[in-house]
Image: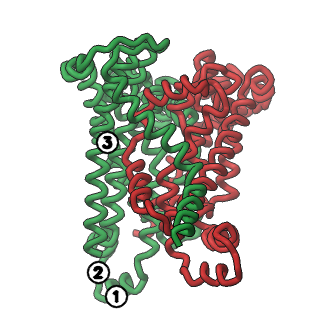
Amino acid sequence: MRMSKLRADIQALLYLLPFLVIYILFTIWPMIKGVNMTFYKWTLIRKMKYIGWDNYSRMIHDKDMWAAIGHSVIFVVLTTPTMVILAIVLAMIANRKSRLQRLYRSVFFLPSVLSVAVASFLGLFVFQPYTGLVNSVLHLVNLLPENTEIFWLSETNLSWIAIALITLWWTVGFNFILYLSAMQEIPDEIYEAARLDGANDRQIFFRITFPYLNPITKTITMLQIIASFKVFMQIYIITGGGPLDKTRPIIQLIYQTGFKKNDLGYAATMSYMLFAILLVLSIFQYWLNNRKGANA
Amino acid sequence: MKNVYRVVSLLFAFVFVAPVVWMLVVSIKEEGMKIVTVVDWFTPPYSFAVYDQILSATKLSNWVLNSFGVAVCVTVLTVIIAALAAFVLSKLPFRYRSFTFFFVLAGLLVPGEAIIIPLYQVAKDMNLLNSYEGLIIPALASPFAVIVLKSFFDGVPNDLLESVQIDGGGTWRIFRSIMLPLTRPALASMAILTFIGSWNNFLWPFLSLTDDNLFTLPMGIPTLMSSYSEDYVKPMVVNTIASLPIMLLFLIFERQIVKGVSLSGIKG
């Protein structure tokens, strides 16, 4: 009896082994090692000097770090509500019965399969003055007078708008599909009953569709906040964090500190700040979900 | 009212395809041509000359292959490794099962971006920088995949497993001939999500690669772009070559991809 229990344990361990080895080596171990790194002045060629809590006190007073966190927050604020609303709108379009239904579905998700570099460079060219697609179209429909140009990428506020629009275009497809599949689960009879009662489109949306989507909206919102907080690559390609570091997000600062300024210890310290923020958001998301589960 | 819906819908569709169409059109223009208005899209001449030039003079085709190769390896291995672990957590009773489950669950809370600096150091100590192994191996243990697959495995009734046991089949046979076939849609969805994730992965290749023979697309494209400044034809050819294979795959596997993504709602 005892023997067979031991055998079951060994068997289970064998199945788990590939996962656990890689998980411990490349997730758990770096997590622990990183904490250790924060107490050192640590360079790329691994010259280490113990400095205690210095990295932490330096971080608390680091204006650049707080600014970078602020930029990540700006990006979250710009993209989260727009992402959710746009996803609902697109899902409503693709959920309406029409001959183009399938086309809409493909078209709205298509940008999501592009590599981040392609999406970002495409966006970069689209927002270029003189030759970019956006300004050309604005000229064409006379929204922008001849001989004037919008310099999207050289002014902080405009570059935020450009970055947010490019990101929306590139990634909204995922949220769109989550909404679309949630909408398809709403039973037709509910709509029919509402129509029989004389409800108009707006009432149907706000009284039926939107409340029905409430749980998925919460999920998408939280996932979007977390994902947006981790923004780096599109901004790095589109503005490089400029003008004057005014769009530099926290991950870019961590990267520059570690690899350009050769200060891995301090970069690791800042990444635990990022970790802490994301952890709070994730725990909040779990809490929301479990509450949702309890109510269901 | 119906027409308003239709016009708005078409407008959205136009906004979503326009940049891609623009990319394709500009890529078949002749170099040095000014493409300033939309009208210019439809005026010849067109030419594929720049495609030949880019393909022969740059490592772009290598990078496309690298991106695909890495994504395929990561996808296949991740799904296998996660399925094995999920099977144990779902169907095999052993002593530390609930502890192991929470240990894996905790991994969902660890953001990869936040441990990238120590991961770099770990990979460096293990001599994994600048290698295909270094691109692939650290990505293979996905707690997300394990948790999602476990929830699907939980849905397979235990009676089925017992019938295999009565026939004298061991756990491996249960896994191979019951669990995997019955949960194929979930496995396929997980594969698709993993593939897209790997395809778009930027930060890790960005930090761990310096050898441009190993670059994946997100790494390679920026190095090319910085050398083109005169007009958009070359950059758009680069973008197009990088995108055509994945866009074709998308059009072929669209239904499965859409299913795979809607499954990811489980994440929440």
Amino acid type, callout 1: Ala
- What is the secondary structure assignment of the residue under circle 3? helix
Q: Residue at x 80, y 23 (%)?
A: B56
Q: Is residue B141 above or below residue A55?
A: below
The reply, left or right, for residue B45 in relation to residue B232 is right
Residue A272 in which image quadrant: top left
Amino acid type, callout 3: Leu
Do the residues at discs 1 and 3 belong to one chain?
yes
Residue B45 in which image quadrant: top right
Q: Earlier in the sequence, mark 2 or mark 3?
A: 2
Residue A277 coordinates in the image, percent (x, y): 27, 39
Which residue position holds label 1? A193
Q: Chain of mark 1?
A: A
Colour chosen for chain A:
green
Do the residues at discs 2 and 3 belong to one chain?
yes
The reply, left or right, for residue B39 in relation to residue A50 is right
- What is the secondary structure assignment of the residue under circle 1? helix
- Picture mark count: 3
Which residue position holds label 2? A199
* Mark 2 vs mark 1: in front: 1
Residue A94 coordinates in the image, percent (x, y): 49, 64
How far apart in space, not on screen, are marks 2 and 3 (Cα)?
42 Å
Residue B18, can we see it? no
* Mark 2 vs mark 3: in front: 3
Q: Residue at x 40, y 35 (%)?
A: A31
Which residue position holds label 3? A278
Q: Which chain is red?
A: B
Q: Residue at x 28, y 14 (%)?
A: A51
- What is the secondary structure assignment of the residue under circle 2? loop
The reply, left or right, for residue B98 in relation to residue B27 is left
Residue B259 coordinates in the image, percent (x, y): 56, 64
Q: Chain of mark 3?
A: A
